Image (cartoon, rainbow, N blue to C red):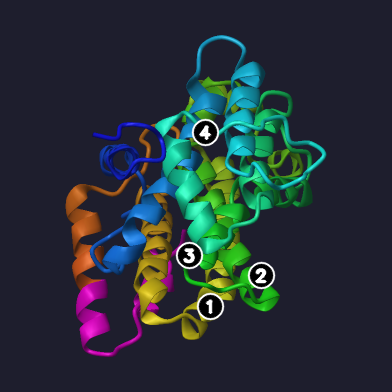
Amino acid sequence: MEVGPDSPDYLDAAFALCEDLARTHYENFSVGSRLLPKRLRRHFYSIYAFSRGVDDLGDEADGDRLALLDLWGQQLDACYPDSGRPDSRSNTIPTHPYFVALSETIRIFDIPADPLMRLIEANRRDQQIIRHETYDDLIDYCTYSANPVGRLVLYLGGVREPGLQVLSDHICTALQLTNFWQDVKRDYEIGRIYIPLEDLDRFGVSEEQISEGKTDDRFRALMRFQVDRARKLFVAGHPLGDHLDRSLRADLALFTRGGLAVLQAIERQDYDVLSTRPTLSKLDKTKILAATWLRSRLRLSLIPASAFKSSARPGN
């Protein structure tokens, strides 16, 4: 029996490991849902495993994280053995199971290296840049940390039009910002603040207040402002679904509805993300999945208008 990296059994096992990671890690949305055509699911899992793996290295790994990210980059280089890129450092084949699977996804869908390299670069930046002075600085960071993921998903659907990539960028930036607002406390505990410093100053919120977990009217006003920003980006990217075929439209709706639901959860907590991390339960995500499936079968808009509305209490 063949057991090498090029054998079908080895490749299937590599994709299975990617799927296991996707199914066991908490996310605000379902990865590779049953609404996605079976032919695409394993490739969603390989993209997810690469993205989740590099984030975990950048956020949680022990030891020299930059060195570990370099090793991750070398595995990525091995997925492009004939690229001729001057920065390529490997003439070997990938050995890590996630990259064995990713290499096959890259080959089938002709995925360029740039978006994958940007995800690694985002995590390199995280080791050196732990504050963002302005909103523009944060948005620039999202061009590395978030937007590449959406473009990778579009490649799986054969979508390469620049205009549609821009719409995808809006949604991915919105998802990234939503995650930042969800994780203010958790990020502070690892030394990072993603809320722009100019906004902390504008609303009179100090880093010490975040450290102490004090949610007052100033902090609530700050978070209301950030939640509104993220929601506007979801709205800006929403037309993307009109240009995708059914193979991607439903999963895009799941990503978007998951992000919007977290924003509503933040609002229901009266913007207190310092005491309790707002999350979606398995039941919440199941309801979103079922509603999206039903709306798809009924040929309705996959995201109802109510999903874009604020759930903040009147007067807040």
Q: Which residues are magenta?
A: 292-316
Q: Secondary structure at mark 3?
A: helix
Residue at 50 percent of width and 51 percent of height: 178
Q: Amino acid at mark 3?
A: Leu
Q: Could you say which disc has been placed on residue 166 in the image? A: 2
Work out whether mark 4 precedes mark 2 in sequence or the reverse, and give the earlier one: 4
**From the viewer's perspective, is the residue at label 3 or at label 4 nearer?**
4
Cβ atoms under marks 3 and 4 closer than 8 Å: no
- The mark that comes first in sequence, 2 or 3, is 3
Cα gap from disc 4 to disc 2, whole angstroms: 31 Å
Residue located beneath label 1 in the image: 240
On the rendered structure, is 302 left or right of 282? right
Mark 1: secondary structure? helix
Q: Quick one: label 1, few (<14), some, or many (20+) residues within 10 Å?
A: some
Q: Is 55 on the left-hand or right-hand side of 27? A: right
Label 3, label 1: how many angstroms apart (C-alpha)? 15 Å
CB atoms of marks 2 and 1 within 8 Å? no
Residue at 68%, 29% in the rendered image:
124
Residue of label 3:
156
The tag earlier along the polypeptide, 4 or 1, is 4
